[in-house]
Amino acid sequence: MFPIRDHNPSGRRPYVTWLLIAANVAVFLLFNLSLDEQQLAYFYYDWGFVPRFVTEGVSLHGIVSHMFLHGGWMHLLGNMLFLFIFGDNMEDEMGHSGFALFYLLAGLAAVGLQYAADPVSEIPMVGASGAIAGVMGGYLLLFPKARVDVLIIFVIFFRIFPIPAWIVLGIWFALQLFNGAVTPLDGGGVAYWAHTGGFVAGVAMTLPLWLRRGGFGFWNRTHGAPPHPEARYPLAQSRVPQVPRRPR
């Protein structure tokens, strides 16, 4: 099950989202294509988030710089796709500067929980997925019934299904909790606790905005869907409507 797009067009150009995607891609191309495997390993230790270094009070820049590093093409493309799908709507709701701050704080919260889980780990954590998890958490709170097109592949057969966001993102979050609970902390691989921390922080930081919109009353008015016409795609034999911009 792989999300590829949502039916939730934004009312403003998501400049911060585009800039974050461009920065991540540029950093990946600059270093992953110019360094060999051993040099990359040292590079990740120097610029990734290594919990033991933070415990010792050294290389603290990794707390932020890790958000712009990725371990491979699939890691990069997967993260950027999720940011592209969900970031524009959160930026639309929060404004450009508000979204930029939200993204950074979600990434820091992801670091915080990953650090708390194993403060002496020497395994470098890289990737924007903790911050992007925060974006997904905020999106879930604001638009639980926004339709998300999910690509489902059955061996040689594939099909796209529109599924409510609360199912897609809820399943994703549940998997992070489960995998975090059963995966040894010293096993490396995916930083499940960072994903969990970012997601929870994203929900918490979006809560004031949700309350200003009316809280449960906002959900009742919109039925949990975006408060504007949804996008329709050619695969559904429909057209993308012109979405009026909401006054700011």
Image (tube, rainbow, N blue to C red):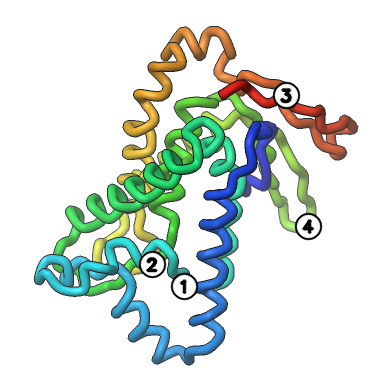
Q: Which mark is residue 71?
A: 1
Which sits earlier in the primary sequence, circle 2 or circle 3?
A: 2
Mark 2–mark 3 Cα distance, whole angstroms, equals: 39 Å
Q: Report the front residue among 96 and 149.
A: 96
Q: Which quadrant, please, contains the C terminus?
A: top right
Amino acid type of the residue that numbered disc 2 sits on in the rendered structure: Val
The residue to which callout 2 is attached is 126
Element marked by disc 1:
loop
Amino acid type of the residue that numbered disc 4 sits on in the rendered structure: Ile
Amino acid type of the residue that numbered disc 3 sits on in the rendered structure: Pro
Relative to residue 50, is residue 72 drawn left or right?
Answer: right
In this rendering, is residue 164 above or below 85?
Answer: above
Relative to residue 237, is residue 166 drawn left or right?
Answer: left
Mark 4–mark 3 Cα distance, whole angstroms, equals: 40 Å
In this rendering, is residue 87 above or below 155?
Answer: above
Mark 4–mark 2 Cα distance, whole angstroms, equals: 33 Å
Which sits earlier in the primary sequence, circle 1 or circle 2?
A: 1
Q: Which mark is residue 156?
A: 4
Residue at the image point whose x is 16% and y is 70% from the top: 52
Which sits earlier in the primary sequence, circle 3 or circle 1?
A: 1
Asked whether disc 4 touches disc 2, contact meaning CB atoms under 8 Å apart, the reply is: no
Which sits earlier in the primary sequence, circle 4 or circle 2?
A: 2
Amino acid type of the residue that numbered disc 1 sits on in the rendered structure: Gly
Element marked by disc 4:
loop
Which sits earlier in the primary sequence, circle 4 or circle 1?
A: 1
Neighbour tally class for label 1: few under 14, some 14-19, many 20 plus, Cα within 10 Å:
some
Residue 181 seen: no
